[in-house]
Image: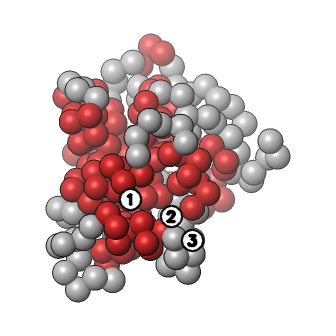
Amino acid sequence: MSTHPLALGRTTFGDAANKDNLLTPEEAHALLNEWVPNERLRMHMKQVGAVMRAWALVREGADERTALKWELAGLLHDADWEKHPDAHCRVIIEKLEELKIDPEVIHAIASHGPKYFGVEPETKMDKMIYVFDELSGFIHAAALIRPMRYEGMDVKGILKKLKTPSFAAQVSRDDINDALSRVDVSLEEIIQFIIDHQRDVR
Ligand SMILES: [Fe+2]
């Protein structure tokens, strides 16, 4: 694999001794408010956080503590993107390591773009954040151009937009397909889940 400028150059993160050391949702939101002035980008992370949390609870049968890990990975995965675009992922990872956060959360963040960061998704949490990231943003972009936003939005309309290269052209269809190929869930199911669980995020 050729090296991307954002490649992290390592595949292990955090310290196993910090297992189960998490931020509270309030602490994570405070970090977001400080690191991400852009409201739209903050919204993206809140939406991915909400979808990750819901998936853990509804589809993985996770307990509250585990669901919080999934939520934190979603909430913080792009936290350094606005202020450190040239070192995206590395800066937030170092911050979370300094805060002694659970290595599973850090690994999920490090693997949310294998092509860029050079870290393969391993756990289900890793794989699902990779699946949700681009699709969540894509669906929100679709909602923003609809007068009724999420009201009446259906899977079919999203599928059609995905096949329209000019719509949200910056969203990589290749990344979406690559992410989907790693999980045993259909695209239709993922789209419906995202619509249902990010529509009310404020
Ligand atoms: Fe993202």
| Residue 136 numbered mark, or none | 1
- Residue at horizontal 44%, vertical 73%? 161
Viewer-side residue, 52 vs 157: 157
Q: Secondary structure at mark 1?
A: helix
Residue 112: x and y in percent read 53, 44
Viewer-side residue, 100 vs 61: 61
Residue situated furthest bottom in the rendering = 147
Closer to the chain start, of discs 1 and 2, is: 2
Are circles 3 and 2 on residues that touch, CB within 8 Å? no
Viewer-side residue, 134 vs 14: 134
Can I make out residue 87 in this image? Answer: yes
Residue type at the position of mark 1: Ser
Looking at the picture, does residue 120 appear above or below residue 30?
above
Looking at the picture, does residue 148 appear above or below residue 121?
below
Disc 1 versus disc 2: distance between alpha carbons? Answer: 18 Å
Going by the image, does 81 lie left or right of 3?
Answer: left
Disc 3 versus disc 2: distance between alpha carbons? Answer: 16 Å
Q: Residues within 10 Å of mark 2 (few under 14, many from 20)?
A: some
- Residue at horizontal 19%, vertical 28%? 64
| Residue 170 numbered mark, or none | 3
Going by the image, does 83 lie left or right of 152?
Answer: right
Residue type at the position of mark 3: Gln
Q: Which residue is mark 2?
A: 82
Residue type at the position of mark 2: Glu
Residue 21: x and y in percent read 34, 24
Q: Secondary structure at mark 2?
A: loop
Residue 140: x and y in percent read 34, 68
Give the number of the mark in front: 1 or 2.
1
Q: Residues within 10 Å of mark 3 (few under 14, many from 20)?
A: few
